[in-house]
């Protein structure tokens, strides 16, 4: 397995959560699939791939546009999060990224920047035993503009007290990489460091 590296310029590390620290994508996929079946949408791994890192409410809006459905985004988004919470104990850590967190804990300041809800994000970190490594977590409720807008990561940098250009962001999705680039940060795509298992039974 190729080892993830820290950029020599990096003075702070910012991690996306779902698909980056936690291999939650198979769990999110299953939750969407279970919920969207009732609305006549066949949720495929390919479709899910186009929505990586997009908050649930915005995902439902995009699906309405795509399929001509009339789901209430807030309502269906919360149904999906409820379904996810029921099965989230099945998630696994993304080992190469988690190793990095443990290695640099106490050496570089670190934060989590996620498109998920705060309560579930902290619960994810607890399930994986990572909550003790982070004090700063910026979630969907903390920003007006989700990824690919840079606000999530800029807020992380501000709370860390570090300039954006010396923050290294670890991400698994295009919206997150776009957000990091727009924030002027160093970005690292982590998907080449582990096998994605979306679509398989969890």
Image (tube, rainbow, N blue to C red):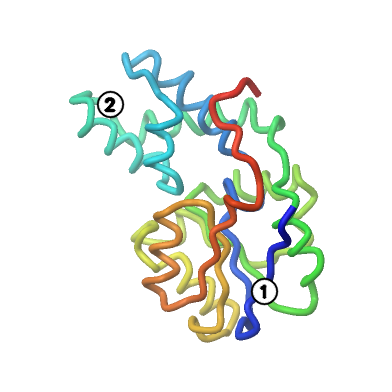
Nearer to us in this view, 165 or 129: 165
Nearer to us in this view, 169 or 146: 169
Look at the numbered disc 2 and give the secondary structure of its residue: loop
- Whole-percent x and y of residue 21? 66, 52
- For residue 56, side relative to residue 13 (left or right): left
- For residue 87, side relative to residue 155 (left or right): right
Residue 112, quarter of picture: bottom right
Say if 1 sits above or below 56 in the image.
below
Q: In the image as oriented, which residue stretches furthest toward the front?
A: 2
Q: State the residue at coordinates (62%, 67%).
A: 111
Residue 159, quarter of picture: bottom right
Nearer to us in this view, 65 or 155: 65
Mark 1: few/some/many CA within 10 Å (<14, 14-19, 20+)? some
Q: State the residue at coordinates (80%, 50%).
A: 129
Question: Which mark is drawn over residue 71?
Answer: 2
- Whole-percent x and y of residue 200? 60, 23
From the image, tell me which residue sits under label 1. 6
- Whole-percent x and y of residue 89? 71, 32
- For residue 121, side relative to residue 45 (left or right): right
- Whole-percent x and y of residue 121? 60, 48
User: Mark 2 or 1 closer to N-term?
Assistant: 1
**Pointers 2 and 1 in contact (C-beta within 8 Å):** no
- Tally of marks: 2
Look at the numbered disc 1 and give the secondary structure of its residue: loop
Residue 91, quarter of picture: top right
Q: State the residue at coordinates (60%, 62%).
A: 15
């Amino acid at each position: 397995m190729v080892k993830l590296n820290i950029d020599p310029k990096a003075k702070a590390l910012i991690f996306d959560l779902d698909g980056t620290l936690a291999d939650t994508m198979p769990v999110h996929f299953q939750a969407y699939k279970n919920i969207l079946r009732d609305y006549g949408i066949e949720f495929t791994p390919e479709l899910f791939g186009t929505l990586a890192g997009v908050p649930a409410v915005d995902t439902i809006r995009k699906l309405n546009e795509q399929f001509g459905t009339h789901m209430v985004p807030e309502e269906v988004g919360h149904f999906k999060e409820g379904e996810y919470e029921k099965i989230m104990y099945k998630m696994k850590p993304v080992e190469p990224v988690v190793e990095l967190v443990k290695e640099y804990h106490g050496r570089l300041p670190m934060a989590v920047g996620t498109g998920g809800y705060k309560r579930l994000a902290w619960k994810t970190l607890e399930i994986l035993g990572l909550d003790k490594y982070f004090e700063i977590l910026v979630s969907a409720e903390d920003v007006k503009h989700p990824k690919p807008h840079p606000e999530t990561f800029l807020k992380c940098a501000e709370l860390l007290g570090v300039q954006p250009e010396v923050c290294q962001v670890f991400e698994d999705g295009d919206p997150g990489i776009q957000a990091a680039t727009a924030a002027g940060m160093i970005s690292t795509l982590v998907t080449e460091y582990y096998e994605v298992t979306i679509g398989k039974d969890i």
